[in-house]
Image: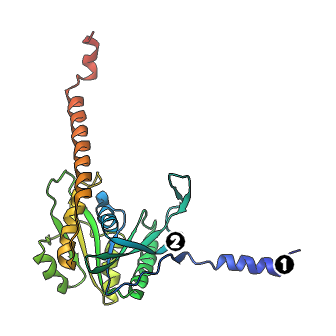
């Protein structure tokens, strides 16, 4: 029989469980890594960009971060195996430059959660020797953009010139409303820790997954960090997305050419 004391101790332990749990899954060593973040956001620009780096270079998952701030759900793979929502850090060897990539399928669901998770992400990054941070994302235009520009934001004045030399635009008042979520807090909280932090944002419609914008952002990252990567798979995805857009436009055109409901009684 379990004693009352044992039950109380068990309940107390349950109440003391951390709301953020860190699991180590790899042991790759990094040398002077640069943190590159690409969590879900506008046009999935940042997420597409970092996933491309993970696929194109030698990579290893290092750490998983679980939190009750993520949606209460699991993903299910092709074999029916479930996986709890989490964010992941990957070690990536990019043409001689080590990258620590942060990605995942979800962002926090509350304001406080964004702060707590970002602090945790920065703790992990600093423990791995990170001194420079790049957050990748998209900035919505409300319309399709064939050749997206890349907008920038930096934590300090010292970060402007390298991005400016790489063709990044700094526009007054953009992005409107600032940078929300982990991407923004990496700059704000990172600066308070003495880290060099910048955000690269590709122009995107805001209502479609945008591999073209992801490539534009990566081309800037290549220049400022110092590596080269191929883009064949991203370009293929961009062509597929272009075909989808053309079909949508054709359907819209057909609908506009249809007679009004009041005129339908005269047909047949």
SS for callout 1: helix
- What's the residue at 77%, 79% (across, down)? 8
Marked residue nearer the N-terminal end (1 or 2): 1
Q: In which quarter of the image is residue 259?
A: top left
- Residue 6 position, x and y percent, is 80, 80
Q: Name the residue under label 1.
A: 4
Closer-to-camera residue (180/42): 42
Q: Quadrant of residue 176?
A: bottom left
Q: In which quarter of the image is residue 171?
A: bottom left
- What's the residue at 26%, 80% (across, down)? 96
Left or right side of 110 for 147: left
Quadrant of the drawing holding the C terminus: top left
- Residue 26 position, x and y percent, is 47, 77
Closer-to-camera residue (188/91): 91
Q: Name the residue under label 2.
A: 66
Q: How crowded is mark 2: few (under 14 residues within 10 Å), some or many (20 or more)?
A: some
- What's the residue at 23%, 68% (across, down)? 229
- Residue 109 position, x and y percent, is 46, 65
């Amino acid at each position: 029989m379990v004693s009352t004391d044992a039950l109380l101790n068990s309940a107390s332990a349950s109440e003391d469980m951390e709301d953020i749990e860190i699991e180590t899954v790899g042991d790759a060593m990094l040398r002077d890594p640069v943190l590159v973040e690409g969590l879900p956001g506008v046009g999935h620009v940042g997420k597409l960009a970092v996933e491309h780096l993970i696929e194109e270079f030698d990579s290893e998952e290092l750490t998983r971060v679980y939190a009750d701030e993520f949606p209460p759900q699991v993903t299910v793979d092709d074999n029916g195996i479930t996986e709890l929502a989490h964010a992941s850090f990957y070690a990536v060897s990019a043409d001689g430059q080590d990258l620590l990539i942060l990605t995942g399928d979800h962002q926090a669901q509350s304001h406080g959660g964004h702060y707590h998770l970002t602090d945790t992400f920065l703790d992990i990054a600093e423990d791995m020797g990170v001194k420079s941070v790049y957050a990748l994302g998209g900035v919505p235009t409300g319309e399709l953009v064939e050749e997206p520009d890349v907008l920038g934001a930096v934590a300090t004045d010292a970060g402007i010139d390298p991005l400016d030399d790489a063709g990044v635009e700094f526009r007054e008042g953009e992005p409107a409303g600032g940078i929300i979520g982990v991407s923004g807090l990496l700059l704000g909280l990172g600066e308070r820790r003495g880290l060099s932090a910048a955000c690269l944002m590709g122009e995107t419609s805001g209502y479609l997954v945008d591999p073209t914008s992801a490539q534009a952002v990566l081309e800037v990252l290549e220049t400022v960090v110092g590596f080269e990567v191929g883009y064949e798979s991203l370009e293929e995805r961009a062509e597929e997305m272009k075909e989808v857009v053309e079909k949508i436009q054709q359907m819209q055109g057909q609908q506009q050419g249809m007679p009004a409901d009041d005129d339908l009684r005269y047909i047949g």
